[in-house]
Image (cartoon, rainbow, N blue to C red):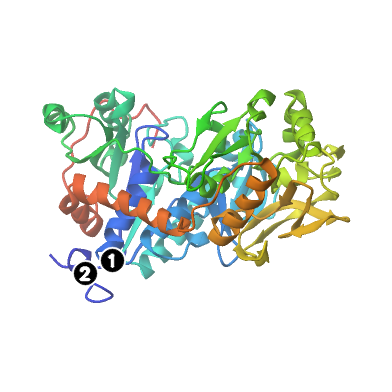
Amino acid sequence: MSGIRGKGGTEGSGVRGGGLLVAGTTSDAGKSVVTAGICRWLARKGVSVAPFKAQNMSLNSFVTREGAEIGRAQAMQAAAARVEPSALMNPVLLKPGGDRSSQVVLLGKPVGELSARGYFAGSGAPSPGERLSAGREALLGTVTECLEELRRTHDAVICEGAGSPAEINLRRTDIVNMGLARAAGLPVVVVGDIDRGGVFASFFGTTALLSAADQRHVAAYLVNKFRGDVSLLEPGLEMLRDLTGRPTVGVLPFAHGLGIDEEDGLRVSLRGAVRESVVAPPYGADVLRIAVAAVPLMSNFTDVDALAAEPGVIVRFVDRPEELADADLVVLPGTRGTVRALEWLRERGLADAIARRAAEGRPVLGVCGGFQALGERIEDEVESKAGTVAGLGLLPVRVRFAAGKTLARPVGEALGERVEGYEIHHGVAELLEAEEPFLDGCRVGSVWGTHWHGSLESDGFRRAFLRRVAAAAGRAFVPAPDTRFGELREEQLDRLGDLIEEHADTDALLRLIEEGVPEGLPFVPPGAPGGTP
């Protein structure tokens, strides 16, 4: 068979622009992991592959080299595909600002705020993006144009859906699941999380709630997070095929510690949550304990992943002042609501606990919104529209929120080491007198602040910073000299590729990617409710 199946290196692809949509029976079924795994498996075969997600709702975002903001999950998938991330891979990004509204980022740039009703139903306040005010349906043209551009320049594009394709209340304006599959002629593999239970009912029910036109694109199922003997599952998979006429193209085992970038900062566990990374024994005589304040609308909490990757470093998310007592470092992370985060810190007594720490010379780090909260005052007529609000007063910084968003990929030096990062913020910081510059921010005593996300992924800088923290905390902690965060991320992505290569029917996946939607897939009654496309 010609096409990507026989491709090696950069030669000989007989087919360009193959595609596949990875949908899920639920949110968190494993769509991001499977998409990344397929991308890495194909990239290792020498296939030119790119990820794509038409619409992403996430507080964890990334800045491309061109200065476009996309979901971090798509940046991670681009790394799995061994390609540079671009705005084409995530044309619509929704950044929640509360329970009922989101900032809409179109082709990497913010174009306005919309309520959930305005976005899904197609009404809302005017914005610079003409298509935005018409709702999601009008964005389908932009989305398909981005996908087609990727398909013109790559042998394969692996698309990720969102939530469930059977959200019948939203089907008319869907641009990320079956709406995209039909517009772009994509076959769909539906992923189900068997660890939650009810996976057979989920597969069957998801299919049976779709219209006949949608069902024609559902080509296969894939079981995720299975524990136990696969032979015990096989009779059920055969019965599922008899019921739906569709095969299961893989049973992926439950895998601990994948550590991939997560999408939804609203659903992080607030108490005692430890990153998935396994804590290795300390390199020195002592461990280092890091407490991350789980502020509302927490964004880019992936910043602490590089800390959790260090042997002997224990990272946990906290929401009570007593949980700071044994922490050697407290981190105030980024947030989409700096003023709201300040209110939350004060209401819970965390603001006073952090102030006491600073007075005692115990380390505190603020990143982006956390940096802004550590300052003297905030003038915000943009994000919260709260006007002038007092900050925690621990850094000589005054912040004014601007309508425009800073999106940048800065490179600099701090603590004698080269540092790379990325910036995503509306707040403009005015630095007053401080003891020491710190990236774009400053340090006073044991309190550091910066707008730079991702700086701790720079290995030399991270080690230098942790040495400072250990000294201030009085810990006999020594950073391991050989921890390479980039290499660890590559190992994790290879593990995802291994899951696909070892536990999926890769021949079946290749056929779907190359040949498209199979002919003759049967209809599963009852189908969508009346009036659903």
Residue 396 pos. (x, y %): 86, 49
Tell me what residue is drawn at x 19 percent, y 48 percent: 502
Tell me what residue is drawn at x 28 percent, y 49 percent: 187
Residue 32 pos. (x, y %): 39, 45
Residue under numbered circle 2: 7
Please state if 342 lies on the left or on the right of 88 as rendered: right
Residue 331 pos. (x, y %): 65, 41
- Image quadrant in which you'd find residue 293: top right
Tell me what residue is drawn at x 44 percent, y 42 percent: 281
User: Which mark, residue 94?
Assistant: none
Tell me what residue is drawn at x 58 percent, y 67 percent: 66
Residue under numbered circle 1: 47
- Image quadrant in which you'd find residue 237: top left
Q: Is residue 270 above or below residue 402?
A: above
**Of residues 358 and 321, which is closer to you in this image?**
358
**Lower position in the chain sequence, tag 2 or tag 1:** 2
Please state if 404 lies on the left or on the right of 10 as rendered: right
